[in-house]
Image (cartoon, rainbow, N blue to C red):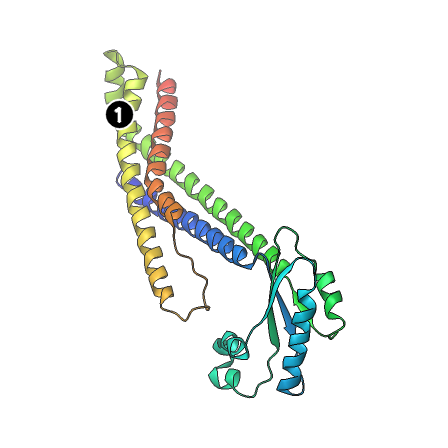
Amino acid sequence: ATRTMPWMVAVMAFVAALALALALAVEAAAARFGAGLAGNVTVEVPPADTPAAGEARAAAAAAALRGVPGVLSADIIPRAATARLVEPWLGAELAGGGLPLPTLIDLRVDPASPPGAARLMAALARVGPDISVDDHRQWLDRLLAWVMAVRLGAVAVLACAVVGIVLTVALATRAALAIHRDVIEILHMIGAQDGYIARQFQRQALWMGLRGGLAGAALAAGLIYFVGTWGAGLQPGLLPALALGPREWAALAAMPVGAALIAVVVARLVVLRALRRMM
């Protein structure tokens, strides 16, 4: 049991480190994405029969939006930029060809007093009732719910990993107590205190937990680094950037210390409880 304990702790620390680091990375990426969308509204003007009519309609919509209180700017996104947005899905030929694409208007609003979607739609009603306004609120709410689900999942995985470490350390400590039962009885006979005996097991559990935690955290860091490096080579926009920051690396670095502390506490409790029964 004592030989397998570091390996079991390493597996639990590996799973816990992956869950914690990826949950923190997802949360940070969602926060960056949400901050980038804060104060932005996208207005979509459907394509017209002719390019000239579409440009005139988009210009009229932008002018109507600039008169709404709380709107800081209303910029028409060029067709070439819109084509680049859909190029990863439609291909360069369709995106840059004669495919009718809507005209997008990038709207910057005052974060302190943003105009509601209803007010923007009322201003656009004179230009065209088919013009749509997307304030990203629904998407941001879904993003927040997804981040919360990821966070709860990470907490559940961490709890399972901690329970696994506790059970592993308890099993190894009980096995060591059974092996050294005669020695412990002799130590009691010559006056050794329970705290002294418990510290011997704590020292052993500390090193085994630290070794297992270091191995698991190192494996998790290597896997995350490999996945991040491989994902960075993909076409931008296909996958979200989940780069680890100082907070995530600090959490990985703290994983071995946490595993060692859990091992020490569990070993002490198991030994003291067994010694009370032996007396």
Which one is nearer the viewer's eye here, 233 or 73? Answer: 73
Q: Tell me which residue sits at (29%, 43%) in the image.
A: 214
Which residue position is annotated with label 1? 200
- Residue 223, can we see it? yes
Q: Tell me which residue sits at (52%, 85%) in the image.
A: 94
Is 25 placed left or right of 61 in the picture?
left
Residue 175 location, quadrant: top left
Q: Position of residue 51 (x, y in %)?
A: 62, 86
Q: Position of residue 15 (x, y in %)?
A: 39, 49
Q: Give the SS element for disc 1.
A: helix
Which one is nearer the viewer's eye here, 31 or 179? Answer: 31
- Measured along the vertical axis of the image, is residue 164 above or below residue 190? below
Is 238 placed left or right of 110 in the picture?
left
- Measured along the vertical axis of the image, is residue 189 above or below residue 101? above
Dot 1, how many residues are within 10 Å of its Cα: few (below 14), some (14-19), or many (20+)?
A: some
Quadrant containing the N terminus is top left
Residue 233 location, quadrant: bottom left
Is 88 placed left or right of 6 in the picture?
right
- Measured along the vertical axis of the image, is residue 121 above or below residue 243? below
Q: Position of residue 98 (x, y in %)?
A: 56, 88
